Image: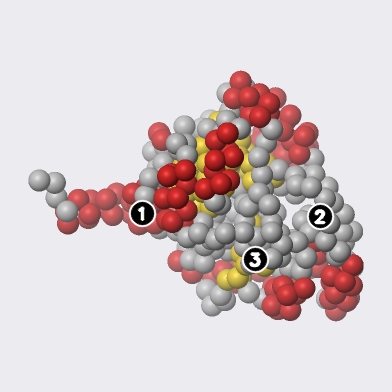
Amino acid sequence: MFHTLAVPVIAAPMAGGPSTPELVAAVSEAGGFGFLAAGYVTVEQLAEKITRTSELTSKPFGVNLFVPGTRPTADISSYVQRVTSYAEKVGAAPGDPRWDDDNYAAKLELVLALRVPAVSFTFGLPDVDDVRRLKAAGSTVVVTVTTPSEARQAQQIGADVVCVQGSDAGGHRGTFVDDGVSPGGGDLYGTLAAIRLVRAAVGLPVIATGGLVTGADVAAVLAAGAVAAQLGTAFLGCPEAGTNAAQREALAAGVRRTALTRAFSGRPARGLVNRFLVEQSPYAPAAYPNVHHLTRPVRATGEVEVMSLWAGTTYPLATAEPAGELVRRIGAELSETINSLAERFPRG
């Protein structure tokens, strides 16, 4: 499926609003491939998004599911107190720090019933039987991995493709298990290094993601052996994206650095540095999704200094243009890069 894209660019699933049907459809229509994010929405809302996307494009698209982990064992009481105090300062009430599985089973049944062309998984592995069911329904199964070990596990359960996430990626790290100690929850590899290591470990096709914005970036990961590049931050400024206005402004300014943090969700994620990230990161426990639910009302205030401003390290290079134009421009840049290299290093 991903080998045959007219433009080897995939719009990453971005939970929390950015991945709209309009964005996904525009990317697929332009010759790329778009993913809807199933995280943080109800089953009914996901069904509506899939239906709407199908109305906007006849091209294939995908859906990404969060694999639920085990209930965290970390004591989060002190962090609840910290966030409660912080919430009062911004006129919000803290959320209920509960654990849930994001309606995983029901969402899986939905994508099976609707025969979604591609289904990707983040934060872990689907069951072997579910992989078989998805394949029987005609879906390509993609698993997000961050290490060679995770890639081997994905291959063992029958995944068709692995999406290799480098450490420059914005948003949540796709690690299967958060070690609760290191900033990224486990080993961190740059995108190119991760591609090389994973390709040496497994024989599956590789999608690359992490810090990719331009056509030259896409050329680099294709040269490293990827079949396509998955971009997230690059699409946040598109008018079709459901990106919050405050985050759009912060991204456009391009002056903040990025950092990995558990402060907003209890799971390592990369975002723009703001006051909440700086003040709370040292105390945030490895407790996803409990912390996500706890801080959600605070983040919902729309105040830039308390929002989760997910973004990759190269976000200042991203532009604000219609998604279709962005895909076509990246495709043109990719061709220019390839032609330039061919002229510099002619055969024979």
Earlier-in-chain disc, 3 versus 2: 2
- Circle 1 or circle 3, nearest the eye: 3
- Distance from disc 3 to disc 2, alpha carbons, whole Å, reads 17 Å
Q: Which residue is mark 3?
A: 182
Earlier-in-chain disc, 2 versus 1: 2
Instruction: Locate residue 35: give its quadrant.
Output: top right
Q: Which mark is residue 220?
A: 1
Residue 134 pos. (x, y %): 63, 27
Q: Secondary structure at mark 1?
A: helix
Out of 236 and 102, give the one closest to the viewer. Answer: 102
- 49 w.r.t. 341: above or below: above
- 140 w.r.t. 207: above or below: above
Q: Secondary structure at mark 2?
A: loop
Residue 97 pos. (x, y %): 87, 59
Q: As shown in the figure, which amino acid type bears the numbered disc 1? A: Ala
- Distance from disc 1 to disc 3, alpha carbons, whole Å, reads 28 Å
Q: Is residue 73 visible?
A: yes
Side (left or right) of 277 relative to 154: right
- Circle 2 or circle 1, nearest the eye: 2
Q: Name the residue rendered at 69%, 32% in the picture.
A: 127
- Distance from disc 2 to disc 1, alpha carbons, whole Å, reads 38 Å
Disc 2 and disc 1 in contact, CB within 8 angstroms: no
Q: Which residue is mark 2?
A: 72
Instruction: Locate residue 137: give its quadrant.
Output: top right
Q: Name the residue rendered at 60%, 48% in the picture.
A: 13
Q: As shown in the figure, which amino acid type bears the numbered disc 2? A: Pro
Side (left or right) of 181 relative to 187: right
Q: Which mark is residue 331?
A: none
- 271 w.r.t. 42: above or below: below
- 264 w.r.t. 206: above or below: below
